[in-house]
Image (cartoon, rainbow, N blue to C red):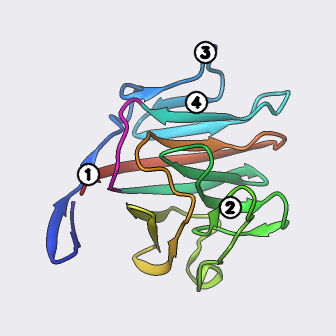
Amino acid sequence: IACTTSNKEVKLTSIFDGNTLNGWKAPDNNIWWSASDGILTARSDSTKTGSILWTENEYTDFIVQMDFKFGDGTIDSGIFLRTDKQQIQIGESGSLKRDMTCSPYIPGKGYPVEASNVAELLKTDDWNTIKVKAVGSVYTMWLNGEEVLSYDSDTAIEKGPVGLQLHPNRDMHIDFRNIMFAEI
């Protein structure tokens, strides 16, 4: 998959092989994350512990793109950018009790801005494509091909892994597929 950014084309490559968690750091005693038939599934456990699945590699500037599909329960997930302190929300905000997909969550600031047109673009019972470009402190998000937000975080971390979140205190599951990545 090719993607254009700053007048240059960037080639996105898969960082999920579809059947294993190779390339990812699963938590010890992983009971939350599984992979098969091209689908990465996050499912809460009986104690609703929550979990983060991190890439093994760390990155500075990058694009990450993936498909996601809401499963059962109240979905509260997201993509962590270089740290567990900067997140792009997928699903409902636990604090706001409403969908904040593609909006950044920044500790101490909550949701400083909200993505536009998400209600019109988000398919709650089908696959959606989210793309996040992180260049320095600027995060740009797309949902199903439409740019919905650009945000400049004054607390951005320069380098780190990318993580997928299964929020604690939720009974839920979410599926991911076609997880693509490019350093830029």
Amino acid type, mark 1: Glu
* Position of residue 102 in the picture relative to residue 96 (left or right): left
Part of the protein shown in magenta: 56-62
Q: Is residue 58 magenta?
A: yes
Quadrant position of residue 159: top left
State left or right for residue 99 relative to residue 129. right
How packed is label 1: few (under 14 Cα within 10 Å), some, or many (20 or more)?
Answer: some
Q: Which residue is mark 1?
A: 183
168 relative to 130, above or below: above
Q: Main secondary structure of the magenta part?
A: loop
Amino acid on which disc 3 is placed: Asp
Residue 123 occupies quadrant: bottom right
Check disc 2 and report the residue beneath it. Answer: 91
Label 2 to label 1: alpha-carbon separation: 26 Å
What distance separates the C-alpha of mark 1 from that of mark 4? 25 Å
**First in residue order: circle 1 vs circle 4:** 4
- Give the number of the mark in front: 1 or 3: 1
- The label shown at residue 28 is 3
**Element carrying mark 2:** strand
Is tag 1's residue or tag 3's residue first in the polypeptide sequence?
3
- Residue 108: horizontal and vertical position, in percent? 75, 59
Circles 3 and 2: CB distance less than 8 Å? no
List x then y, in percent, for residue 130: 47, 64
Q: In this figure, which residue is indicated by the disc labeled 4?
A: 33
Q: CA distance from mark 3 to mark 2?
A: 26 Å
In-image side of 41 versus 146 (left or right): right
